[in-house]
Image: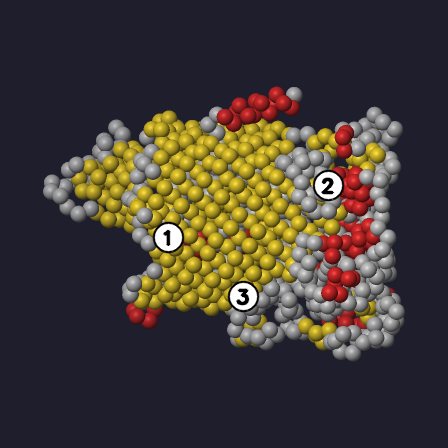
Amino acid sequence: MHRRSMAVLASLLLLPCFLFAQDGKIRGRVTAKDTNEPLIGANVVVDGTTLGAAADLNGDFVILSVPPGVYTVRASYIGYQTVVIANVRVSANLTTTQDFSLPSSAIAVEAMEIVAERPLIQRNTTNTVRLTTQEDIQNLPFRGVQQIVALNSGTVLQDGNLHVRGGRVGEVAYYIDGATALNPFNNNENVGVIQEAIEEIQLQSGGYTAEFGGANSGIVRTTVRTGGQDFKATVDYRTDDFAKPGEKFLGTSAFGHRNAVVTASGPLLSNKVKFFLAGQHNYQRNRQPLFLEPFRFDNLVTDALGQAGPSGAGQPLPGAVEFEENYLPRNQREDNSVQGTLTYDLSNVLKFRFTGSYAEVNNPVGGEWPGGTPTQTPVAESQNGLQNVFQRRLAQQETISSLANLKATHVLSPKTFYEASISFSERKFRQYDETFGDNWTLYTDSLANAEKGYTGFVRRYEGPYDLSTINNFAFNHPNAPINTYYRDSQQDLGASLDLTSQVSKSWEVKVGGRMDRWTMRNFDVNNISATMQFLYGRSGNNPRVFASEYERKVLMARAGGTRQTQMINFFGYDVDGNKINSGPDGPRHPLFLAAYVQNKLEYRDLVVNLGLRYERIATDAPAPKDLENPAFDEKVNYIDESQLTTAEATDYLLPRINFSFPVTDRTVFYATYGKYVQLPQLVDILTGNQVLSISVSPVTRSPYGYFGQYAGFTAKPERTTQYEMGIRQSITDNFAFTVTGFYKDLIEQLRFDRVLSEGKGTIPEGQTVFSGLLNNDFGTVKGLELTLELRRVKRLSAKVSYTLSDARGTGSDSRATQVAVSDGGARYPILTYKLNYNQPHRGSVVLDYRFAKGDGGKILQGTGLNAILTFNSGHSYTQIQEPETLGQASPWNIGVRPLIDPRSSYPVEPVNSSSTPFNFNVDLNFSRLIPLGRFDAELYVNVLNVFNTKNVLNVYPNTGTSEDDGWLRSEAAGSYVAIPNYADFYRAVNVDNRWAYNTATGNDLFGNPRQIFAGLRLEF
């Protein structure tokens, strides 16, 4: 059955099939100005390209396969004056309507030139599409695609995660020039785009047609700029580095951010070949802008509660524990990237486009304040800037990402063309010790460390004791080794075809399909010290003897412990970290196949999209053939790898119906219905066989999955059904609004749950076999979106976006049920509640006031101000009782014990009945354009968080405030407060600076402080 379905799919993909078509089209009508009669055969061409069309019997024309960008379009006819319309914007996969009215002319005259204005309402789109062009982006005070997208209605940006219309984290797909830029391993954007290289960003927040898939909530499509007929270049440099660390400039801390971008574009050798190239260097001395209150503690000494070592208590710490205001040393980051496009118009019917990107990111791990700076891998609690304040070395992270996409467009006739595409993307990541590189077996070797000047080791493979002070607050020793090593890689090879045919002037047909085959590798050593002691003994002189390499692999992998977070987890590598390409520990190869057919009926008073999409998703996750009685090697408690299979592939048929029609010449009504499917992040699904064994072993499996022993192969894709209805209304020629109502059914959402027996083996029916990821969560989202847009009038343009929404479900993420709210009652929610990222009210106001060249006199011409106000009503959370005893918490994280230990989380109200405070933020960009002969210079100042507002993002659930966790004022704290320095140190690190909260949650209680950037941009 499996082979047959694969053969059918392969046959289907041999047909002209799918590509996320990146091109748009221009359609319109050419008429005589004096009689309004159609001008049959009139020529319409796009200047600077080989694109054009002739008007038909009704004067109508259609120009297909127009790359996104801004163009000049001209229409000509014998006996009539040629009309040239500039500034015609074409967007990806959208239709631009441009009519021509040609004056009659008895004699030859110069062409009539007209500058087009971007339409305020999109008459030809049948769903919600938000466009942000390079012209819009250029004046924004901040950088980053995610931040730009979050200005739109229907989006929530919370704790660094983007949610679209109530969707979970990771439900947004990213595409660059039609190639996938989403990494399914973590469902993050695999390749970023330099801001100056963006032609446009297109957000589809719902109701997307059958040609789009791989996302349950939204699609972000970025188009990279292409070169024009003339050579152009720009240089841009900005920095906030106007004060020394710990000091301020204009009441504002400097974080040492410096960003430089260079772009170049134009023809290459001939006008048939054009290029665009952008390079960026970004350095951040402190990559984590945050509110940090300064503190200093001198003369602290060790106590006898931690690993004080032979010297015992009373030894002075190596120095003062000190942090300056808003500054974290050893927390830098450096990014270098290059991106570009190359287009080749071989002939009028054949053209090629290449898009390439390469980026490197390097930064240390362990210099950050916990929370607020996402890392690629889970970092131990002790790996943060406070506990590492004395440690001489930190682990390093390196991320390398690349993308190459080649697309060929072949026009078969004026009404039919196809596109063929092949793409390759790769992301490589590693976390390592700079001293020893990839040779992780030396990380905790005292002999190798001594040669590098790191001494004081307790034993051969055991580093120096921690420095415990003030009732067991542990600092890492200056010579403490790096005890973890991590590397992974994901490669995608994608191929696609797309056939588009304009069957008639009103009927367009697309059929297509795409294949993406990933190669994924992972190697993670979580406790090097324990692993090396297991192999060579505590003294390092007793090498362990194994009966076979198989036994060595099995036992070595779990030397650090039997929890997933303690083991060596590997696939695509062997247990030593050597790359392998086959066998039971070989790389995983997830496969994504899609095919669709799309009919678009496009009349002047009606647009209908009818489509059907097919998707096949195969994770290649290893799985036992018999879930209840998996075949095991009982001698070493390891799964029989010869009896493993892979998780069953899933197939879906997804109908899509979209339509729009004008109620009047200024009003457009639209509605959509569609079914969507998306695979959750594969990092939760793909594991090595050693982790799989622990998860399903009758000896070690856990029915609760509390300690990471869960099965991921049980997960299937999550589904949504979406409904959307809206009105676009143009009030005047310069002002319009859009109102959209939406409703989403969240179906088969993932959660940690118990896999129950079917009674086929020794386990009674209905009893727990093991814990796994099951599709048992559900929810609903409903909302109303409002967008107001004012085209520039008397120098002012404006855009207002507002969303009213209600997102409810049985779980905010797949791990929501891993933490029980209380020990009593039902273990899993059976009723929906407000989700953690539910923000009922959210919006933005973007105002841009600008003097054009020649406007405002010598002083004001070229001057502009861009102001952005963002606001939200806070998000949902549950108030809980304050802890009365330590339990399994320490004296340093007792204030957040309910966030660490689920058994101490006792709610005092229904789940998520409370809300964090309303917050507002204002960002500004002030610029002045100065013409300097052959080039223009632009000076600008960007101010983020203008009023330096300490916006509350989260609160302590036991106190309902962000200012106090409640511990020091509780009666239970009395004996601890009596300890010298305890209260002052606890207040400094936790009450004033959120150390315990950020460590427990990975998030911060407050937003970022003010930043001031000054920059210079030169354009040649």
**Quick one: SS at disc 2?**
loop
Using a 10 Å C-alpha cutoff, classify the residue at mark 3 as few (fewer than 14 neighbours), some (14 to 19) or many (20 or more).
many
**Residue pictured at 29% horizontal, 65% vertical:** 933
Task: Using residue 145 as the reference point, say whether residue 451 is left or right of it.
Answer: right
**Quick one: SS at disc 3?**
strand
**Quick one: SS at disc 1?**
strand
Image coordinates for residue 776, horizontal then vertical, percent: 72, 36
Whole-angstrom CA distance, mark 1 to mark 2, is 46 Å
Q: Which residue is mark 2?
A: 688
Which quarter of the rendering shows the N terminus?
top right
Q: Amino acid at mark 1?
A: Ser
Whole-angstrom CA distance, mark 2 to mark 3, is 39 Å
Identify the image quadrant of residue 35: top left
User: Label 2 near label 1: C-beta < 8 Å?
Assistant: no
Q: Which residue is mark 1?
A: 265
Using a 10 Å C-alpha cutoff, classify the residue at mark 1 as few (fewer than 14 neighbours), some (14 to 19) or many (20 or more).
many
Identify the image quadrant of residue 505: top left
